[in-house]
Image (cartoon, grey):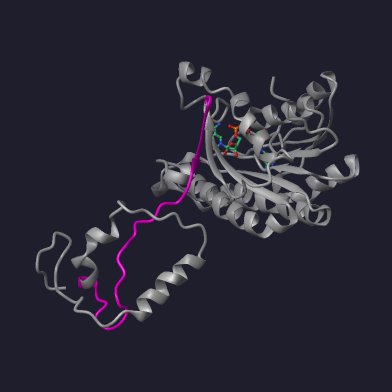
Amino acid sequence: MAEQLRFDDQVVVVTGAGGGLGKAYATFFGSRGAKVVVNDLGGSFKGEGNSTKAADVVVDEIKKAGGQAVANYDSVENGEKIIETAIKAFGRIDVLINNAGILRDISFKNMKDEDWDLIMKVHVKGAYKCARAAWPYFRKQKYGRVINTASAAGLFGSFGQCNYSAAKLAQVGFTETLAKEGAKYNIISNVIAPIAASRMTETVMPPDVLQNLRPEWVVPLVAVLVHKSNTTENGGIFEVGGGHVAKLRWERSSGLLLKADDSYTPSAILKQWNKVTDFSKPQYPSGPADFMTLLEESMQMGPSEQGDKVDFKGRVALV
Ligand code: NAI
């Protein structure tokens, strides 16, 4: 039988751990030997109100099962207080799971600044503040594991979720950079786009679908990614839920490369638009540096007759 992944003596901070996915992470890590900080503001899924109950219930559950946990009731916007709870209670932090989240769904036409700002505050600033406060500890001990939480809404867009989509794709860029900056200190950061039954999804998905999306089924991937044995899977983007796990990456068409001079006109691009959108020989960029290679190639190209006047359908046009 395969050995169980254990987290003995490690300190795991889970934000938004009073319910849904966060609770599933917290109880799992509590059952695998970790000391858990159960953070939850205890408000509504729209970010209204607060209560200590959500976190307390999960702490009690972990303790009753023989684990170790403390509660923290701060908003993730005050991430330093959450990390301080870990340090005061357990003297260290090894794993940070940025999971807390809310929704403010509304069509873009009707969106108010308040809907936009609150989502940015909880998701973007919240993840930043928690990671920022944990970072010095991670660097000093040359060990840290971070999970940030994106969403399919962020990766692909989703009607009525402009604010949430923007905040969730921000998690990807944030994670990619943390992965690059943390690598030499053995700080590994990955980002997940989960799907699970929770109060967030119970109003938008039918009961029979929700039955197959238990939050517990997101946990195994997270456990693998934050375990000490994972030293290579860094900066990964994963979709996970209902027993399915898949990795995503950016794909770029091999593209159109033209001499960047006076002949580089709109019609020059239109003339070869099929090359811009041709994914038959895809590239998988992983950083800004490889673009520089393309730039150098373009600079070395000779002048060309790229200024023919054509439109998207290849017709001659007055452009
Ligand atoms: P949930 O609503 O059950 O859990 C979120 C928890 O975060 C709640 O307990 C809430 O009190 C807490 N929270 C909210 N604002 C907070 C703040 N400022 N500070 C501290 N805690 C706060 O929702 P669920 O589904 O478990 O979501 C967890 C994460 O997964 C969220 O980031 C969500 O956006 C993301 N997600 C969930 C999906 C799903 O299918 N359930 C899909 C894609 C992403």
The residue drawn where x is 67% and y is 32% is 22
Question: Where residue 305 sits in the image (x, y, percent)?
Answer: 19, 79
Q: 16 left or right of 208?
A: right
Above/below status of 241 relative to 314 = above
Closer to us: 146 or 278: 278
Question: Where residue 158 sits in the image (x, y, percent)?
Answer: 42, 41
- Please say whether residue 105 is visible from this viewpoint: no
Q: 271 left or right of 216?
A: left
The residue drawn where x is 59% and y is 44% is 191
Question: Where residue 70 sits in the image (x, y, percent)?
Answer: 84, 33
Quarter of the image with the C terminus is bottom left
Question: Where residue 179 sits in the image (x, y, percent)?
Answer: 63, 54
Q: Which residues are magenta?
A: 242-267
The residue drawn where x is 28% and y is 55% is 278
Above/below status of 149 relative to 318 = above
Above/below status of 50 relative to 288 = above
Assign the magenta stretch its main secondary structure: loop
Closer to us: 100 or 11: 11
Q: Is residue 259 magenta?
A: yes
Closer to us: 44 or 222: 222
- Please say whether residue 211 is visible from this viewpoint: yes
What is the tally of numbered marks visible in this picture?
0
Q: Is residue 19 magenta?
A: no
Closer to us: 307 or 281: 281
- Residue lying furthest left: 316
- Residue lying furthest front: 1
The residue drawn where x is 73% and y is 25% is 3
Quarter of image, ligand 1: top right
Quarter of the image with the N terminus is top right
Q: 139 left or right of 304?
A: right
